[in-house]
Image (cartoon, rainbow, N blue to C red):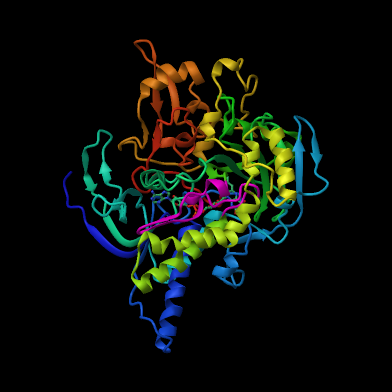
């Protein structure tokens, strides 16, 4: 490739501008200021001069690739920014009226008592896009450099050792055949004393690094769910800001984990979404389709009547909890937030834990800067802080939650109910398997799971229409960022064994098996539709799909999600 690859030196490099990295960068800046003031007043120790902190983000703008529910538990935001309300944190509303329903196809049973993990009194409905944009402004005001359109493409190691020394960012201007275009710009080697991976769920760098360093040697396999969501603009305020509904049951089958949320936002916006556990059994399950069906339930249909769908998106979340958390540190490296599985699946909440993990990472980095020691041993203090502190305490109580659902919904609801009363205690430790291992052969299922259902274009939509509302764009003239190791498997084995579930699990119509003019079929990858949810990387039965970041800036353009 033409062009010199530049090297940029930094003290601290954070990958991904999500709540984890932004909280880490902001807290670290505050800690450094306090430390230097103390040293100046004679408390001993060395002054830290200018510490350079940079955040790289693959989206064109902070927040554009962020999608969440979200109900925010504010306890860690209030530690990061104690007066967050008066500082203008973009909160939609405090949670007010809340309900949990178990749905049957036409009916609903209201839970007389809301299970404690789903109680949201004291929490806030928020849009994560707005929240991270606001945190980003705070970071920039504090002198932190944020580089949008810079995906981390490869980890940099010190020679042949496993010591992390930074990240190489993705090249720009490569055509679909892998040749440089006139606007070619090689990626930059960003070298740092410590690199923090805050890539969110199923991080592409994190996945390879965890495997290379064996950080998951003592943890259970990661498990995920995918959330598919829409925003609806309503003609009136029938579902005011702060109103909250959660549902379980229909349309999901009893072997599939999941449920829905409906949150009231400002300006007559209803935020509605549906979560499907990426450990379902039936390869015909289509998370986008399940969500469309949900909207035909009388409860939801009535709520959305007269409204207009204005946004769409999808994203995975790690739900395995405590037993699936890998080691979070190595020489020169820390992992924060969803990348480290620090999400409480029982509460469907991870923002507060991402913020806390970022803050704890900052505390450990400060000590490392002061002692000029970035060894694995020094940075392992972070694992101890996470496990022994509030994050560990919260995750430990829910340690058997998703594990119970590994055996289906009925078993899951009973066991999760018991474990929420006993603080997570069960007589045995329940095993958990990687989600794709649950898929059963297509031959065990008859016909079309969704026979008779056709989107009406008003209440329900097909995937292509929905993707339009995600604002997704990628230049078509670049290498496909969805690397399928062997497409012969798709055509032969997968067709026979699982009926090509990629066509179903992708919520953006990226994967299509198309007829060849000469006969036979081939896999067509419409990568420009990709909403970066990572479901394909997670749920592919043969684990031959590798999601890597496309050229910087490409992807969804989420607003208010
Ligand atoms: C459907 C859904 C509903 C949810 N509901 C709630 C809720 O109600 N309450 C709650 O508290 N939590 C909720 N969560 C979880 C919450 O959103 C996450 O826990 C939280 O966003 C994690 O923050 P993070 O910083 O770890 O990662 P993220 O928020 O995912 O941010 C990661 C960032 O890294 C960027 N990135 C990724 N890879 C690279 C790369 N290689 N190079 C550069 N940039 C990269 C991404 O573009 C993204 O901006 C929900 C999640 C989902 C998916």
Per the rendered image, the range of residues in magenta is: 321-350
In this rendering, is residue 372 above or below 426? below
Question: Which residue lies at the image location 39% right of the left edge and 12% below the top edge?
Answer: 520
In this rendering, is residue 305 above or below 130? above
Q: Which residue is more in the foreground, 240 or 347?
A: 347
Magenta region includes residue 246: no
Instruction: Specify the quadrant of the image occupied by residue 439.
Output: top right
Residue 199 x, y percent position in the rendering: 44, 51
* Secondary structure mostly seen in the magenta stretch: loop
Q: Which residue is more in the foreground, 392 or 482?
A: 392
Residue 107 x, y percent position in the rendering: 79, 33
In this rendering, is residue 179 above or below 354? above
Residue 420 x, y percent position in the rendering: 72, 49
Question: Which residue lies at the image location 34% right of the left edge and 40% below the top edge?
Answer: 475
Magenta region includes residue 324: yes
Q: Quadrant of the N terminus?
A: top left
In this rendering, is residue 18 above or below 34? above
**536 with respect to 319 (left or right):** left
Furthest-top residue in view?
519
Residue 380 x, y percent position in the rendering: 44, 60
Judge whether residue 372 can be spotted in this image. yes
């Amino acid at each position: 490739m033409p062009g010199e690859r530049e090297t940029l030196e930094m003290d601290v490099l954070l990958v991904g501008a999500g709540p984890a990295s932004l909280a880490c960068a902001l807290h670290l800046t505050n800690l450094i200021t306090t430390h230097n003031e103390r040293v100046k007043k004679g408390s001993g120790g060395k002054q830290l001069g200018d510490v350079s902190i940079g955040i790289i983000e693959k989206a064109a703008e902070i927040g554009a690739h962020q999608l969440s529910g979200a109900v925010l538990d504010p306890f860690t935001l209030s530690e990061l920014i104690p007066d967050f309300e008066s500082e203008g944190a973009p909160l939609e509303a405090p949670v007010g009226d809340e309900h949990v329903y178990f749905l049957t196809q036409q009916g609903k049973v209201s839970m007389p008592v809301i299970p404690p993990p789903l109680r949201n009194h004291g929490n806030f409905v928020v849009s994560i896009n707005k929240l991270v944009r606001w945190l980003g402004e705070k970071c920039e005001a504090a002198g932190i450099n944020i580089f949008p359109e810079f995906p981390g493409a490869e980890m940099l190691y010190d020679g042949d050792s496993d010591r992390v020394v930074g990240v190489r960012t993705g090249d720009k201007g490569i055509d679909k055949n892998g040749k440089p275009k006139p606007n070619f710009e090689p990626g930059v080697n960003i070298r740092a004393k410590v690199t923090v991976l805050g890539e969110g769920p199923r991080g592409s760098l994190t996945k390879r690094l965890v495997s290379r360093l064996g950080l998951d040697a003592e943890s259970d396999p990661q498990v995920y769910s995918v959330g598919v969501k829409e925003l609806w603009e309503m003609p009136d305020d029938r579902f005011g800001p702060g109103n909250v509904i959660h549902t379980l049951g229909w349309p999901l089958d009893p072997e599939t984990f999941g449920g829905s949320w409906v949150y009231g936002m400002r300006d007559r916006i209803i935020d509605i979404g549906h979560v499907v556990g990426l450990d379902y059994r039936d390869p015909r399950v289509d998370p986008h389709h399940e969500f469309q069906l949900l909207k035909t339930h009388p409860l939801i249909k009535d709520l959305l009547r007269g409204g207009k769908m204005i946004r769409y998106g999808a994203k995975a979340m790690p739900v395995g909890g405590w037993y699936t958390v890998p080691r979070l540190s190595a020489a020169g490296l820390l992992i924060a937030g969803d990348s480290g599985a620090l999400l409480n699946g029982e509460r469907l909440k991870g923002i507060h834990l991402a913020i806390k993990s970022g803050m704890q990472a900052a505390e450990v980095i400060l000590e490392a800067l002061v002692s000029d020691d970035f060894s694995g041993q020094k940075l392992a203090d972070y694992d101890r802080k996470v496990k022994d502190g509030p994050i560990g305490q919260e995750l430990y109580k829910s340690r058997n939650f998703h594990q119970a659902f590994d055996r289906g919904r009925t078993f899951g609801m009973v066991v999760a109910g018991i474990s929420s009363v006993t603080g997570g205690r069960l007589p045995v430790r329940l095993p958990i398997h990687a989600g794709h291992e649950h898929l059963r052969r297509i031959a065990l299922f008859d016909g079309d799971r969704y026979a008779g259902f056709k989107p009406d274009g008003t209440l329900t939509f097909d995937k292509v229409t929905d993707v339009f509302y995600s604002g997704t764009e990628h230049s078509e003239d670049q290498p496909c960022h969805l690397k399928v190791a062997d497409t012969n498997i798709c055509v032969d084995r997968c067709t026979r064994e699982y009926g090509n579930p990629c066509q179903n699990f992708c919520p953006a119509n990226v994967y299509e098996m198309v007829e060849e003019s000469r006969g036979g079929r081939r896999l067509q990858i419409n990568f420009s539709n990709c909403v970066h949810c990572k479901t394909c990387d997670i749920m592919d039965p043969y684990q031959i799909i590798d999601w890597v970041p496309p050229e910087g800036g490409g992807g969804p353009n989420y607003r208010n999600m």
